[in-house]
Image (tube, grey):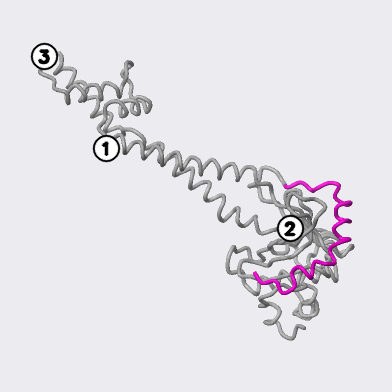
Amino acid sequence: MINNDKLFIRSKYAQKLINGRDFFLQKKNIEPEEEPLEPFMRVTDDILCVREHRYNIRSVYIIPFVIAFWIILIYAVSNIGLNSNNISYAKEKLIEYEEMKKSGIYFDEFDTNSLNYFKGLFGENKKYSIINYLKTVYLYANEGHREAVKNNLITIAIISIFTFYLTLFFIKSPRPADIYFDRRRKIVYTWVLGRLAACRFENLGFLEKSTGVVLYLYGDKRNDHGNYDLIRMKVQPTGGVFLNSEEGNNYFLQQIFNFMEFGKSSLITGDSFNRNQPKTYFFTDKKPEPFEERLKDILEHEHILPKLYRNLKE
């Protein structure tokens, strides 16, 4: 039973969202707006779409990390070999050693090795290159120099692996599907990489955390279509990855109930609303097919959902 706002909002355990219906509908009315706050993405007569939290993770973590790793990689690669001052110095030493050899000055082993080193840096065409540098270090540099270059190359290889893996993840990750609140059918549904998740609104689970609002639906097990399990979806009402505020959560949850009870006129002033989707994705997560058939199957079994999240503490 809900007897005050702190008890419900600060609950440590998952429970039915519908339990908060009276509490939220009795709160001060929120005036409809031309553009509701995020994470609301679309509002029509029957559908309210909510953005899932992975959008924020992508913008806060993935994109900055991809950029940072590429900057580090470019910087590391650009520092392989000699800089312009060292190249000029190497040219001067090469000329010096070649003149010494022509003049018949005695060359010891060190001088011979040094001449080969500087000559190797520029190759037969007298032009410096990274390839020439690496080959010359391997053939003529001292052990300490070779070890330092080897360690630099290993470091660059490791950075490259992380950079390309993170970039590949960034490119291949589809734009997550929104969470759909269907007012006409009184259901909630979404999908993740081919897995469909849904439930009746009355059975939708809920848990508020500092990292956002967790919603519990019923859906396909991973790689096991036809068998079902608890599916967690997270929404960050205030847009923060951490420390989502109670005020922001209250606005989000109250608007969910307003829409399900009174329709779009409680949220927006126009006929419909569509927020532009982020442009940081290369493709979207496709709706699983046959959608309606799979949705029907899940709704036939989702009555056990409250038993799965009841007293669940995360």
| Residue 29, image x, y percentages | 77, 77
Is 244 located above or below residue 113 in the figure?
Answer: below
Give the CA distance from mark 3 to mark 2: 82 Å
Q: Position of residue 64 (x, y in %)?
A: 53, 51
Label 3 belongs to which residue?
A: 104
Mark 1, secondary structure of its residue: helix
N-terminal of the pair, mark 3 or mark 2, is: 2
Magenta region includes residue 265? no
Q: Which mark is residue 144?
A: 1
Q: What kind of secondary structure does the magenta stretch mostly adopt?
A: helix
* 187 vs 110: above or below: below
**Amino acid type of the residue tagged 3 in the rendering:** Gly
**Label ID, residue 41:** 2
**Residue 293 within the segment the image draws in magenta:** yes
Percent of width and height locating residue 59:
59, 53
Question: Which kind of residue does numbered mark 1 sit on?
Answer: Gly
